[in-house]
Amino acid sequence: MSRQWHVPAPTLVAYAVEDLSDVDSWSVEAHLVACADCRAALTRASAGTPAAATVGLVHERMALDLPAQRAPASRLRQFFLLLRGAPGARASWLLALGLVLVAATALDATIATAGLADRGTWWFDHGSYVVLVAPLLQIAGVALSYGPWIDPCHEMTGSSPLGGLRLLLIRTALVLAAVVPATLLLGMVTGRGTPVLTLLPGLGLTTLTLALGSVVQLRHAALAVGGAWLAVSVAPLLVDSVPYLLASPRPAVWVPVIVLSSATVLLRRRSFTYAPQLVRS
Amino acid sequence: MPQVDMQGLTFGYRGRPVIEGLTLSFGTGVHGLLGPNGAGKTTLMRMLATVNRPSSGTLTVLGDPLRSEHGLRSVRRRLGYLPQTFGFYPRFTVREFVEYFAWLKEVPRELVNSDVDRAIERVGLGDRADDRLKTLSGGMLRRVGIAQAIVNDPEVLLLDEPTAGLDPEQRMDFRVLLRDLGQDNCVIVSTHLIEDVAAACTAVTLIDRGRRVFQGTPDQLIAAGDTDVGGDTPVERGYTTVLRAYRATT
């Protein structure tokens, strides 16, 4: 360890032969604890004095007892550990996410070569599987990121100070960080689905899931919200009419949903503090 | 002021009470929590660990009645908990796993590495610190669980069946660790291994069907034992006598 300042040699000698005032000795000791160079210098300075044996003993003890000094933990490592601890971040979920997105993109890219019967319908001209499934992936990720049914360590994570809404929000942010850029990128590649068209429903349904998750179990909330999204989006297609939520971004719908859901989550944050009651094991 | 104080604590699953009006307190020392299967030991531990909220009654931990979010969070920073069903992430190494919980428990960043090393050292896993959890035996995993529970130097430490899966030698080491931790902290150990309690605990609490049956020292429990009841050891006889006497009156 390099330090700018070292104990001057005469002071070290005075310290070694106990010829230093108490206050000065404490300062020297405080520095010695942190400075290997000065400890080495002290060994040399004390050679041949009555203090030599004591200094030698102290060195021996330090070598035996003190573990190797480790640098403070880094924030990057903290981030990766918290990320890896999120059940949703498991390889299987990421793989499923990738597969679904690739499949949706492939369908979007080949939509033009679909059956001739589809030609002229709204879905043929404007539809996008990526826009349809991206919000579902987000709420699935949220449902799979927190709770006793998915996290094997939930009793321990849930009773930690970071547990509850804070950890849920951290993990939700990680899910969004994985899904959002991927869907935006794929939307641009296929040219179907503007960024706003993907972003607004995704954010709206995610906050809605969290809000509903403060009342019922998060996984049930995700199923309900996802089912509702599919029903509202797909049902009009079946009867050959234009799906209201897929056709354009509809901020008049999503902004109130996002604001009200976020407010609900904040007001009901205590409902995430304790573990939901499952059937007794 | 005891570290843990319960007044008329009640908890039920779907209307069926599991803990009924429990009034108990635990101070500094190692407390053994005994009781037959289904007595409500694990439910009680989960409430003390702030995993579950009591249905009624008051629970005060480290002087805080756990009513405000802020109070609960600061209490959680000073708690350690090893659940009975100890789940783990198989791909984490021992060090990563313990460090993960140091972060979740908001251990200050500059202390994380040294606290993690010390916790792993204390459970005797220093030489396995970089091994993945999936390569460890059941007894070792249990010790990893204990390490994550003590990583934040908790003032209240809750261990639910901590000696399950430990071999006799490890159980002896564990008792030494328990006595050490119980010097300054409140350690509550739920167990069905009555011998562990006799060897390592300063106080014993016996519960049955969600109610308190006995609270005292291990010696008092031993003294309560009739010689004509079953049981191989004095503590077992004390346990059986007290439990039977209680059941006869209810």
Image: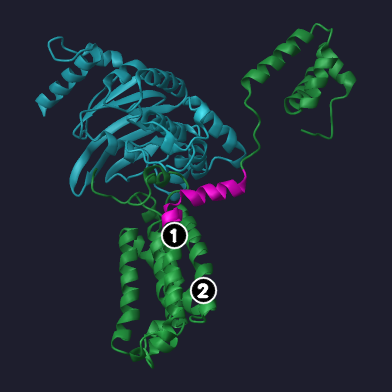
Tell me the crowding category of disc 1: few under 14, some 14 to 19, or many 20 or more residues within 10 angstroms, Cα based.
few
Question: Dividing the picture into quarters, in which one does residue A51 lie?
Answer: top right
Query: Pointer 2: what residue?
Result: A186
The N terminus of chain A sits in image quarter: top right
Query: In what element is the residue under mark 2?
Result: helix
Q: Position of residue B17 (x, y in %)?
A: 19, 42
Measure the C-alpha gap from mark 1 to mark 2.
Answer: 16 Å
* Magenta segment includes A198: no
**Image-based side of A260 in relation to B40, left or right:** right
Q: Report in which chain the residue with disc 1 lies.
A: A
Q: Give the amino acid type for the residue marked by disc 1 in the picture.
A: Leu
Residue at horizontal 9 percent and vertical 24 percent from the top: B248
The C terminus of chain A sits in image quarter: top left
Which region is colored magenta? Answer: A74-92
**Image-based side of A37 in relation to B55, left or right:** right
Q: Position of residue A31 (x, y in %)?
A: 77, 27
Which of the two discs, 1 and 2, labels the residue nearer the N terminus?
Answer: 1
Query: Pointer 1: what residue?
Result: A95
The relative height of residue B168 versus residue B78 in the rendered view (above or below) is: above
Residue at horizontal 82 percent and vertical 12 percent from the top: A46
The relative height of residue B174 versus residue B149 in the rendered view (above or below) is: above
Colour in which chain A is shown? green
Q: Is residue B3 visible?
A: no
Which of B107/B125 is in front? B125
Q: Give the amino acid type for the residue marked by disc 2 in the picture.
A: Leu
Residue at horizontal 41 percent and vertical 67 percent from the top: A100
Of all chains in the rendering, the one displayed in cyan is: B
Residue at horizontal 32 percent and vertical 74 percent from the top: A228
